[in-house]
Each structure stands twice: as C-alpha cells, then as structure tokens.
Amino acid sequence: MASRFLLFFLFTSLLLSISLAEIHFSEIRSDDRQIIPFDEFGFTHLGRLELNVTNIHLSNPNPDLDRSKIGFFLCTRDSWLHVINQLEDGEITCALQSDLIKPVFTFNELVKDQTSLSKTLTHNDADQYTLVFANCLTSLKVSMDVKSAMYNLDKGGKARDYLSAGKTMLPRVYYLLSLIYFGLAGVWIYVLYKKRLTVYRIHFFMLAVVILKTMNLLCEAEDKSYIKRTGYAHGWDVLFYIFSFLKGITLFTLIVLIGTGWSFLKPYLQGKEKKVLMIVIPLQVVANIAQVVIDETGPYGQDWITWKQVFLLVDVVCCCAVLFPIVWSIKNLREAARTDGKAAVNLMKLTLFRQYYIVVICYIYFTRVVVYALETITSYKYLWTSVVAGELATLAFYFFTGYKFKPEAHNPYFVVDDEEEEAAAEALKLEDEFEL
C-alpha cells in the first residue's frame, strides 16, 4: 500500500506541476529507483517524442541481466492506476510488461559495449502522457544522460509546437494579461497624479507591485512563446524568475503593510508587525528558491519531492502570517472606538479592514482550491483555463485593493454628523459578536 501511494503521488505531483514540457536535459547518477517520471505532455494526433539516452552505465555489467526490465515508456494517469493494480495482483512483475503502457524502448536493444540509444516515436493517440523510466532489477543502479523532446506538429506537419496541447494558448494569454496590467498601472499613475495631495507612501508601493506584476507576465509570455517555437526559453526564464521573486516579496509585503495600516493610518510599524515582515520576506525567498528548483530539475531529481513539500509548507506559512496584521488592526480599531469618542470614524475603518480580511482569505485559499480543482478535473486540452482563472482572481484582488485604499481628496471620515455618530456608537456595541 505504501509503495502504491508513493508511485501514485509521483505521477499526481508531476501532472499538477506548473512546469511545462519542452526540450529537457536530465542527468541520472547511480540511481536505483524503480520508477523515475520525467516529463508530462499533452499530445495531439500529430505528436512526436524524440528521446536520446547517452553515457549509459549499469552498476552490474553482467551480460545475463534481463535488460527487458529496464527502459522507457509513456503512460497516462488513468492507465498508471491500473498498472499499479496489475503489479499488486501479481499479473505482472514490471511496469514494462503491462499492455496499458506505450513502450519507447528497453535496454535489451543495447548491443555489446553500446552506451547510447535514440528513438523517435510518432504518437497518434491524443491524450496527456508522462515519460517514465522503469528499473525492475533489484539493487541495480543506473547512470545516464537523457535528452527528451516532446512536441506536436501543425496540420501541415511542418511547424513544431513544444507546448503541451492544453497550454499552447498560454503565450497569448500572458501577453493579454500583461497589457491589462500595463493599463492598470497607467490608471493608477493617473489617480496618484490627480490626488497627489492625499497620496501616501503605501500608494507608491502599490504602483511598484503592479509594475512588477506586469513585467512578470511579459517575461512569462516571452518565455512560453520561445518554448512553443524552439523548445528553449532563451534566457527569458531567468528574467521570469527574477520578476516572479520580486513580485512575490512585494505583494506579500504590501498585504502586511496594508493590514497594519502603515502610512495611511500610522507612520510607523510596531515591533510585532516588523517581526511578521522579518518572517514573511525570508520565507518568500525560500519559496522562490524552491520554485526554481522544482521547475528546473523536474520529478526525475531525487530531491524533487522534498523541494515540492518545502514550497507548499512555506507557502502556507506565508499565507497565514499575512493575516495576523489585519486581525491586529481590527482589534485595535475596535478598542479605539470605545475610548476616543469617534465611533463613526472607527466603524468605517473597522468595516474596511473586515472586508479586506475576508477578501485576502478568499484570494489566498479559495482561489487556490478553485485552480487546483480545475487542474484536476479539466480535460488536458483546456488546462490553460486554470491559469486564466488564477490570474483573473489575482486581477480582481488588485482591483479591490486599489479601489478600497485609493487616495481620497475628501476624507469621508471627517464628515460625520451627530446622528451618524450615535448610530455608529450603537453598532459598535455589537462588535463583541464578531469573531475572527
């Protein structure tokens, strides 16, 4: 049961990974794992796989080894579940023996002293497949260099598309989103100029976040565009990681700063609020390092699952940490409303921070659940929809934050009559019923 769960986890983690198939170079050194998943790809009816394995070395050079139990194959997730059942029921002793897989080649094709194999496979069955290496010989360690290229041909059979069938639209999607955020940055600059007398430092920080998000999307669009056409990112992946790193840190910092009321409610940060920033920023650094390792190594790396777990853990901790300043601000406003005689003013602020608290929770948790569900249930041909859903949720969060915390030329907090003050005082008497 444990081995079955581990093998299924490898496949599931691969299929839900955000990295995209392209031309991959992988180095395997003295590895005795029975199953090593490499790349996943959505093939059309004009799919191709080019596999080149060099510098093959087996820890046991015995020529009598059954090398038909060592090799590569393609398999869908549904088929893999049935292969596991066949192994558990004793119908087969090696995944390469299953009739549910599509063999690429096995090592019994190696002639004496041969250390390399190449194979081009025409794939006409449209589906989402994973390239897998199987080693069914106990205690045998394998070393090799693997170059894999999976792509689909256009209807004319000439142009190659190295993006998976479900993600071939991503370059256009990211280009469009970058234009939307560019327009959003322009609108925000106009707002800051028109209301420059009431602009706080936090508003310039918001502008920086939008600009970094724009650059991040533009670099990702170029990254995917080059991969689509050539199989390589041509350096755009480096720029994408840089802007992704900066965008992630500034976004989480912005949420923390807004939650504390920095700049527009108070000009300083308290000690506990500084500690939250000291926790969130280093964790974001770790999360971005983990993301780079996950994307660049792939599941064939022996530490890939560990880095995947590190990323998920750090991501959850960051998401929880940014909520604390909002909770503290809500409690501080509630206490101030009872002592400073400005019930209406504090009720407005309290309502605003409650709304932001709810929106942050929905953005951080609910959006991720929806995206995960789309990745799980959506056909491989429409995997791009999960990306669109996540980006639209992010765009909505940016709009909400900018609208609710935009600079105001006429502060409504100071235009409060006696009736509003009395009504607010009565409303605040019920505040103890609100639980965080």
Image (spheres, grey):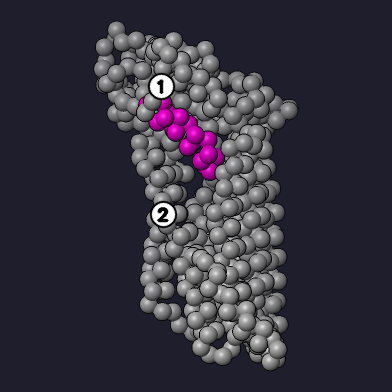
- Quick check: 75 above or below 349? above
- Quick check: 342 above or below 255? below
In this figure, what is the number of numbered marks?
Answer: 2
Asked where in the image residue 282 lies, by quadrant, the reply is: bottom left
Cα separation, mark 2 vs mark 1, equals 32 Å
Q: Residue at x 60, y 20 (%)?
A: 122
- Going from N to C along the chain, the mark reached first, 2 or 1, is 1
Please state if 421 lies on the left or on the right of 38 as rendered.
Answer: right
Q: Nearer the viewer, residue 245 or 390?
A: 390
Q: Amino acid at mark 1?
A: Ala
State yes or no: residue 168 in magenta.
no
- Residue depth check, mark 2 versus mark 1: number of the one nearer the observer: 2
Q: Nearer the viewer, residue 142 or 347?
A: 347
Most extreme residue toward the top, as rendered? 64
Instruction: Name the secondary structure under disc 2.
Output: helix
Q: Which residues are magenta?
A: 3-20
Q: Nearer the viewer, residue 289 or 80?
A: 80
Q: Main secondary structure of the magenta part?
A: helix
Q: Residues within 10 Å of mark 2 (few under 14, many from 20)?
A: many
Q: Amino acid at mark 2?
A: Val
Instruction: Give coordinates of residue 38: x percent, y percent.
Output: 46, 31
Q: Nearer the viewer, residue 81 or 254?
A: 81
Residue 134 circle label: 1
Please state if 288 lies on the left or on the right of 419 as rendered.
Answer: left
| Residue that mark 2 sits on | 314
